[in-house]
Image (tube, rainbow, N blue to C red):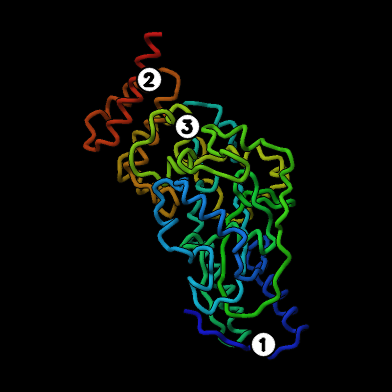
Amino acid sequence: MIHTNHTLNTLSKHSVIEFSNNIKKWGTELGFQQVGITDTDLSKYEQRFTEWLAQGMHGEMDYMSRHGSKRTRPAELIPGTLRVISVRMDYLPPDSAALEVLHDPAKAYVSRYALGRDYHKLMRKRLEQLARKISAVAEQSGYRVFCDSAPVLEKAIAEKAGLGWIGKHTNVINSKAGSWFFLGEIYTDLPLVVDAPSDKSHCGSCTACMDVCPTQAIVAPYVLDARRCISYLTIELRGSIPVALRPLIGNRIYGCDDCQLFCPWNKFARVTNERDFHPRVRLLAPELIELFAWTEEEFLKYTEGSAIRRIGYECWLRNIAVGLGNAPYSEDIVIALKKRMEHPSDLIREHVIWALSRHTSSMIR
């Protein structure tokens, strides 16, 4: 619970405006590319989110529906919340060679956001620093910081706070910076000045993201069926990947960036200045066979401090087996897959058998 502090209520309107502007200045000094402020009224988004859940498009992400209306009503999640400070931080790494890796079926594609250090820790640390700075000046205001760590409707909040608009692929797009950025929030009891929302979409008639999606997961403009999304299938899903979708995954073993790679607005995207987000060499353009040979100890070693750790070794091998099944036939791939045939995990063996069957059928053809 936030214990409401009315410090700013006694200030003049000019002072509140100045304080709100200072928050944005402090945020950019801490490495955020943009800071916006909004109120807690997300009613515009609540019905849309509720309908999405009712259609089951969240798949097995039960946490999306577990907290009732707390996700769409910030003051229910953290009582006393009056405003939400929304921030964005660029993460596009330099020389990521995304398309080159995607077009080489023998290589493994890792979503560009996961090539470096886990963003959660870095973002939360910076948000905490900003919140403490605000709190010190406002004389102990109440706050909570979030970065994918609670039921927060972060994209809606970012749109309301003026950071960009939610595109047809359901990611937030900024007209000057594209969409390659992370989001984070500070819930506060301070009556700060709110920013004008970016509630007008600038996607126009463009359907590039919908057309290029490998699994056609964007089932309508601004509607994503997570059950078909490769990011969901390779990261969130813990069980068997639907057989019909496996060939469409290609060599994407952790996440998918296609909808961003082909979005015209990303011509304005800027390379991150955060060294922590720069690629680890082992993950930038690795061979599928090389990653498939990692022991669990090697997996834990090479993904230390990485967001990839969250899927675990079993799903890691599951995903790579699918990638190997989609790769052109080679004797080396068949040998690599056969080495995993005796793996104790039913999940891994199932996907290995599928991958081998693909190569067997290609030999027959």
Q: Secondary structure at mark 2?
A: helix
Residues at marks 3 and 2 touching, judged by CB atoms closer than 8 Å: no
Q: Secondary structure at mark 1?
A: helix
What residue did someone put label 2 on?
358
Q: Residues within 10 Å of mark 3 (few under 14, many from 20)?
A: many
Q: Residues within 10 Å of mark 1 (few under 14, many from 20)?
A: few
Split into 4 quadrants, where in the image is the C terminus?
A: top left
Residue at point 45% right, 51% down? 307
Image spot of residue 197 (x, y percent):
71, 62
- Between 27 and 188, which is closer to the camera in this rendering? 188
Residue 298, compared with residue 343, is above or below; it is below
What residue did someone put label 1 on?
9
Is 31 left or right of 352, judged from the image as shown? right
Is 62 left or right of 215, judged from the image as shown? left
**Marker count (numbered):** 3
Q: Earlier in the sequence, mark 3 or mark 2?
A: 3
Image spot of residue 314 (x, y percent):
31, 41
Residue 291 seen from this side: no
Residue type at mark 1?
Answer: Asn
- Between 83 and 177, which is closer to the camera in this rendering? 83
**Tag of residue 292:** none
Residue at point 60% right, 49% down? 171
What residue did someone put label 3 on?
249
Residue type at mark 2?
Answer: Arg
| Separation of marks 1 and 2 at Cα, in angstroms | 67 Å
| Separation of marks 3 and 2 at Cα, in angstroms | 14 Å
**Which of the two marks, 3 or 1, is nearer to us in this view?**
1
Residue at point 46% right, 79% down? 1
Image spot of residue 202 (x, y percent):
74, 47
Residue type at mark 3?
Answer: Ile
Residue at point 61% right, 68% down? 41
